[in-house]
Amino acid sequence: MAESDGPEDRKPQTDEAHSAFTPPSGVGQPPLPEDDHPSSEFALPEGLSPEQPAEPEGSAFDLPGGTPPGAGGGRVPPPAYTPARGVPMVRLNKEAPWQDRMRTLLRMPSGERPVPERVQRHDDQGPAVPRVLDLTLRIGELLLAGGEGAEDVEAAMFAVSRAYGLDRCEPTVTFTLLSISHQPSLVDDPVTASRTVRRRGTDYTRLSAVYTLIDDITTEDTDVTLEEAYRRLAEIRRNRHPYPGWALTVSSGLLAGAASVLVGGGVVVFAAAALGAMLGDRLAWLCAGRGLPEFYQFVVAAMPPAAMGVALTLLGPHVSWEGRPSAVITGGLFALLPGRALVAGVQDGLTGYYITAAARLLEVMYFFIAIVVGVLLVLYLGVQLHAQLTPEASLHSGVRPVAQTLAAVTLSFAFAILLQQDRSTVLMVSLNGGVAWIVYAAMHDVGGISPVASTAVAAGLVGLFGQLFSRYQFASALPYITAAIGPLLPGSATYFGLLGFAQNDPARGLASLSQAVALALAIAVGVNLGGEIARLFLTVPGAGQASSRRAAKRTRGF
């Protein structure tokens, strides 16, 4: 059967037959709709003109208006411009003590700090950030609980984190809270950890062991892994106190007896003051075992020395002996005054840690009020019993250079035992306390200088020598300072102030207490100033020139 050859059966020769919407032959092509015109999404809408070509990029050091510095009319750039050669790179002397190097870095803006050079080695994956932060917090906790200043605690935490290769770490220390934040990079979220100090104690042997651990961590010659650091830290925590309880009680009595000799007491006064202080110490331990707060422990500890002094005053007319019962109470107060917390509080305030300083000074105030309450209760009872408590009885004590110097050395020795210091530092700090008393007595008793100025100069020498000893040992300065300021504590002024209030003479009592506060501040400021002078001008053996240590930013009060 033949196929049809009609025109309707022939296939078209063009592609128009592929579309059902193609118009027939001879019909004009209709205009395309607007949607069928393809355009770029970056095309400018109708009615808008294209942007002007961008100006050539200039230098960051050019002045506004395109004029380079020093060109055209002699225009000079303001001092806020970054110098053309860049910011000078900070170079830290590796032989300098790590405390000085870390303080220098802490006082720098974070953007100017040099990249840390990893001291301790890790595997290819780098340091374990959570474990390094936890180790850093645990070390800071031991230091803060031991009475170290906030700046020194931050410097120690900063040293440990940088030794293990963590850059961009910011430690923060307050009175009971420590925190540290680490930001791996500028685009990563920071990792923050914190730890709370629940209990504080005095054990300078443990404090020295922590400083030894930090020194080994920050030294390139010693390889201390995280596991080794944790093991040594656990051993420090489990370490028993170097002195038993009976030795602390005897030291408390020895301290009170030596202090009574400083203010004019004799053998009988020495024995009475020592007995009262030991009895107060045992009563305070009993209250601590019952879970009473420290405020009530101080109240109870202050009562036996005061009662011993009142008893000797009442027995004076019936017993023929020449003594100064008020010196017994003064000696007992020496063993209770919180000199360690006072120095740490003022030091934190002088270095810019105002929250921690306020908390420490508030703690000192509570302890002082507790002592006032305990002594005033006994003194008021003695006044009611017609005890002849006269402040003039101990003011006119003769100058006894040899006896008083030996008493000052003995007082510092007993204070060092109470602070649980390492045996190798006891002799040095005892001699430092004797030197402090000689300077004070020479200025006040011989030179006639005011007691506040004499105390400040003597405390400054204590801080200077203490900082020198610590820099040679690469250890904390507290074991060389705290016990040495014992002979300078304002025990006499405190007692006379309390006696004035007990005898209904608030004007005299307030004047004596104001002098006690002034003496306490003179001690704290002198110790801090002596330490700062040592850091500025003294170097360690073989260290060469010390690294520059920046000061805190000057705010001018606003």
Image (cartoon, rainbow, N blue to C red):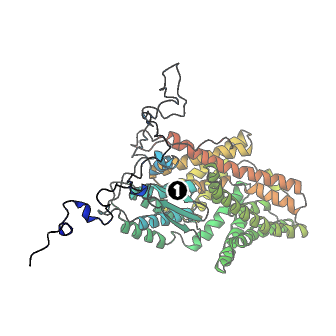
Secondary structure at badge 1 equals helix
Give percent across and percent down for residue 491: 73, 57
Residue 90 seen in the figure: yes
Location of the C terminus by quadrant is: top right
Q: Is residue 218 left or right of residue 194?
A: left
Please identify the quarter of the rendering in which residue 219 is found. Answer: bottom left
Q: Residues within 10 Å of mark 1 (few under 14, many from 20)?
A: many
Q: Is residue 373 left or right of residue 403?
A: right
| Front residue (pair 556, 221) | 556
Residue 485 seen in the figure: no
Query: Which residue matches tag 1?
Result: 154
Q: Amino acid at mark 1?
A: Glu
Residue ID at (62%, 70%) = 249
Give percent across and percent down for residue 486: 64, 56
Give percent across and percent down for residue 63: 51, 29
| Front residue (pair 375, 554) | 554
Q: Is residue 7 left or right of residue 141?
A: left
Q: Is residue 402 above or below residue 14?
A: above
Location of the N terminus by quadrant is: bottom left
Check the image and name the residue furthest to the bottom.
290
